[in-house]
Image (spheres, coloured by chain):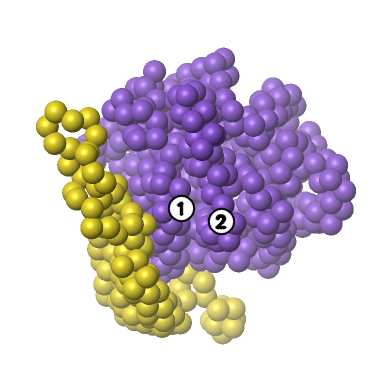
Chain colours: A yellow, B purple
Amino acid sequence: MEGPLAIVVGILIATGVYLMLARDLLHYLFGLVMISNAANLAIFITGRLTRASPALIPEGLEVPPMPVANPLPQALILTAIVIGFGLLAFTLALIAQAYKVLGTLDVDTMRIAEPRKIKRKASP
Amino acid sequence: MSWLLALPFLIPIGTALATFSARARHPLCGALSVLGCTILLIIAVTIILLVEQNGPIAAQMGDWEAPFGITLVADRLSAIMLLISAIVGLCVSLFALSDIDKNRVTLGFHSFFQLLLAGVCGSFVTGDLFNLYVWFEVMLIASFALLVLGGERVQLDGGIKYVALNLISTLLMLTSIGLIYGLTGTLNMAQLHISLAAVNNPVAVSALAVLFIAAFGIKAAIFPLFFWLPASYHTPPVAVTAVFAGLLTKVGVYTLIRTFTLIFPNDPGFTHNILLGTALLTMLTGVLGAAAQYEFRKILAFHIISQIGFLVLGLALNSPLALAGSVFYIVHNIVAKTNLFLISGTVQRLSGSFELSEIGGIYKASPLLSTFFFIAAFSLSGFPPLSGFWAKLLLLKASLDQTAYLVAAVILITGVLTLYSMSKIWAEAFWKPDPTGDCSDLYTLSLPERLQRLLPVAFLALVTLGLGLLPEPLINYALATASELLEPKDYLDAVLKPESIQSMGNR
C-alpha cells in the first residue's frame, strides 16, 4: 500500500505548489492546506502500513505476543494536525483582516511595507 | 535535576499566563514580564554553571528512558544560548515598558513575548526532533501574533509575507522529520547520531540532509531563502524587531549547527559544501542589500542576513576553530544586533523617523546614546578591540588554516562593506546637522522612560565592550563547545544508557 499512497502524497504536493504559486492569497492558503495534508500523510506512511494487530498488550504480558502496528506516527500526526489547524486558522484570519484593511488579496499590489522606489520619487 | 531543565520554558509559560491575566493593569503586567525574565536569567546561569562543571546534563521527561520518551539535554552550546536568550529577554522586556503602547499591552504583548521566549528556550534544551518541531511552532505562532499585534496596514503587509514563507519552512521540517523517522525508527537526536550512521542508503540520507538545510535555512534566513526577513522586520514596534533580530534567526542557526554536527556529521563533502556556498552568498547578498537601503531598521535587517552567513560559515568549515568562531560570533552578534535595534528605537523616539534623510544631530542631542551606538555598530563591523573583531578573527584564522583563501576574502570584503553601512548610519543619523530641527534630546523624556530605554542599551554595550577587552573566557568556552560538538560522546552518554549505545553500535 505504501506505493500508491506515496503517489498520492506527490500529487497533493504538486497541486499544492501550483496553487501556492498563484498571486491570490486564498489560492496560496488552499495550497498550504494541501501540502500540510501531504506532510501528515507522509508521516503516516513512514510507520509502514501493515495488517498487523492494534498496539495493545494483553493483561499479564510485558510485550505484545505478535507484530503490532506502529502507533507512534499516528500520535505524531495527531499533534501535527492540531498544530497545523491552529496555524491555518491564524493564517485565514490574517488574510481576512488584510483583505479588510488593504482591500486586496493580490500579493503583487501589496507593497506598503516595501514601497517601489519609483512610486516614492513620484510623491516625495 | 529533571525539573531544572524544564524550567527554561516553564517559567516563560507561567509568566505568559500571569501577564495575560494582568494585561489590563499596565504597570503590574510589565513588571511581571521583567520579573519572569529575571528568574529565567537566574535559571540560565545555574544551568551554564552546572554544565561547565559536569558536562552535558539530560533529563528524561515522565521518566521514560531515552529513545522512548522526550529527553531534555543541555550541553555547552544549549547552555550559552539559553544564557544569552535570557539576557536579551530581560533587556527587551525592560525596553518594552516604554516602547510598547498601552493598546498593545492590553492586547497581550507581554504574554506573546513570554511565549516566544518559551519557544526559543524549549528549542535550545530539547533532545528530540519532534519536540523541536513543537517548540518551533510555539515560537512561530507567538512571533506571528507579535508581528501583527496592533494591526497597522504596514504590519499586516509585512506579516502576510512573514507568515507565508515561514509556514513553508514548517511543512518542510515536518516532512523531513517524518522521513527521518521512516528511515531510522527514532526521533531522539542522540540515537539518530548512531542509527543514521548505520543506514546504508546514501541517497536517502543526502536528500534528507538537504531537506533539513532548506527547512532550517528558511528559519535562519540564509541565501536564497531570506526574503521574508527584510519584508517584515521593519514593520512592528522596535521592541519586537529587537527580540526577533536577537533570537529568531539564531534559533535557526542553532538547529543547523545541532543537526549537522550531531545527526548528519558523516558526509561533510556534500552537506558542508552546500552550507559553505550558501554561507558565502548569504554574507555578500546581505551586506550588499544593506548598502542599498536608507532606512535605519532596513539596513540593520539586511545586516542580520549577512551575519547569519558568518554563523553558518563556521559550521560549514567544520573545524574546531571554525565552530568555536561560530559560537563566539553568535554571542557577539545577538548582543550587538539587539542593541542596535534598541538604539534605533530610541533614535526614532527622539527624531520621529527611521528614514536616515530625516534624522540628524543625534550626537549633539545625546552623546551618551551615540557612544553606545558607536560601540555596537563598530563591533558589528569587526573593529578591535570590540567583540566582533575576535569573532571575525577566529573565523578568518579558521579559513586561512584550511587554505580557503576565497572564504577569507569574502569575510574581509563583508567586513569592509559592513563598515560602510555602519558609518553611513553614523554619518547620517548621528553626525550630520538635524535636517528638520525638531530633534529632541534625551532629557525631554521622563526619568523612568529614560532609564527603561538606556539601561538595556548600556548593559548590552558593556557586554560588547567586555567581550572585546577580555575575550579569553568566552574563546575558551567556545573552543570547549566546539570539541564537544565534534566529539559528541559526552552528549550521547548523558542521554542514552551505556548499554543501549553498545547494542546499537553492534547492530
- Residue B449 location (% of width, % of height): 44, 37
Label 2: which secondary element? loop
Q: Identify the image quadrant of the N terminus of chain A.
A: bottom left
* Residue B256 is at least partly visible in this image: no
Q: CA separation, marks 2 and 1?
A: 9 Å
User: Mark 1 packing: few (<14 Cα in 10 Å), some, or many (20+)?
Assistant: some
Q: Is residue A22 left or right of residue B461?
A: left
Image: A61 above or below B294: above
- Residue A45 visible in the picture: yes
Residue at image point 28% right, 49% down: A70
Q: Position of residue A46 (x, y in %)?
A: 37, 57
Count residues near mark 2 (Cα–Cα under 10 Å), then give few for <14, some for 14-19, many for 20+.
few
Furthest residue in direction front, as rendered: A66
B379 on left or right of B444: right
Which residue is painted at 36% across and 51% down in the image? Answer: B137
Nearer to the camera, B111 or B404: B404
Contact, CB < 8 Å: mark 2 with mark 1?
A: yes
The quadrant where residue B186 appears? top left
Give the residue pinned by disc 1: B183
User: Amino acid type of disc 1?
Assistant: Leu
Image point 55% across, 79% down: which residue? A116
Which disc number belongs to residue B201?
A: 2
The chain holding disc 2 is: B
Above or below residue B329? Residue B269 is: below
Name the residue at the left extreme. A59
Find residue B388 and report its image quarter: top right
Between B273 and B286, which is closer to the camera in this rendering? B273
Name the residue: 28% across, 28% down.
Answer: B62
